Amino acid sequence: MKDYIFNTTNENVDVEELDKVIKFACNHLKIENPLLNIVIVDNEKIQEINREYRNKDAVTDVISFAFEEVDDVSYEDFRFLGEIYISYERCVSQASDYGHSVKREFCYLAVHGLLHLLGYDHMVDEDKKIMRALEEEILNEYDIKR
């Protein structure tokens, strides 16, 4: 399943770990036959995507494009959830800022992006509490601690 993870940077990204945490999260959430892409990019590329698709000219850590939000797209044999873009540079800097490992931050961003693909959001406080609790539940059960 790792052929869904694309590293467009020159960085040595642990795609095995990303694959494991995504599989774990999908099992935890009881998502059958998920299909998604994860693209690891640099700050310049994620800023370009953020500017083009979200009208925000700024670097961010993760951007998700949920394909199930389109009503006329469905498949019988699998769920095509969408695409997750993660900035490797931002991941590394946030890990340092938050005082935890790059592995933990990468796993967090992957799970965060996955939850966005599934319709979770954090725009209002109540939704944010639900999403954050689910992120922590998945990461704790996966044994990724802060």
Image (cartoon, rainbow, N blue to C red):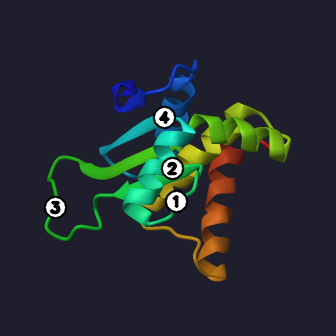
Distance Cα–Cα, label 1 vs label 4: 19 Å
Distance Cα–Cα, label 1 vs label 3: 30 Å
Name which of mark 2 and mark 1 comes first in the sequence. 2
Q: Which residue is mark 1?
A: 57
Q: Which residue is mark 3?
A: 73
Residue 47, disc: 2
Expressed as whole percent of the image width and height from the top left, the position of residue 92 reads: 70, 35
Q: Nearer the viewer, mark 3 or mark 2?
A: 2
Q: In terms of secondary structure, where does tag 4 sit?
A: strand
Name which of mark 1 and mark 4 comes first in the sequence. 4
Q: In terms of secondary structure, where does tag 3 sit?
A: loop
Which amino acid is tagged 3? Answer: Val
Distance Cα–Cα, label 4 vs label 3: 25 Å
Q: Does residue 79 lie above or below 20 as drawn?
A: below
- State yes or no: discs 3 and 2 in contact (Cβ < 8 Å): no
Frontmost residue, 72 versus 139 = 72
Q: Which residue is mark 4?
A: 40
In the picture, measured across the screen, residue 81 lies left or right of residue 88, that is left
- State yes or no: discs 4 and 2 in contact (Cβ < 8 Å): no
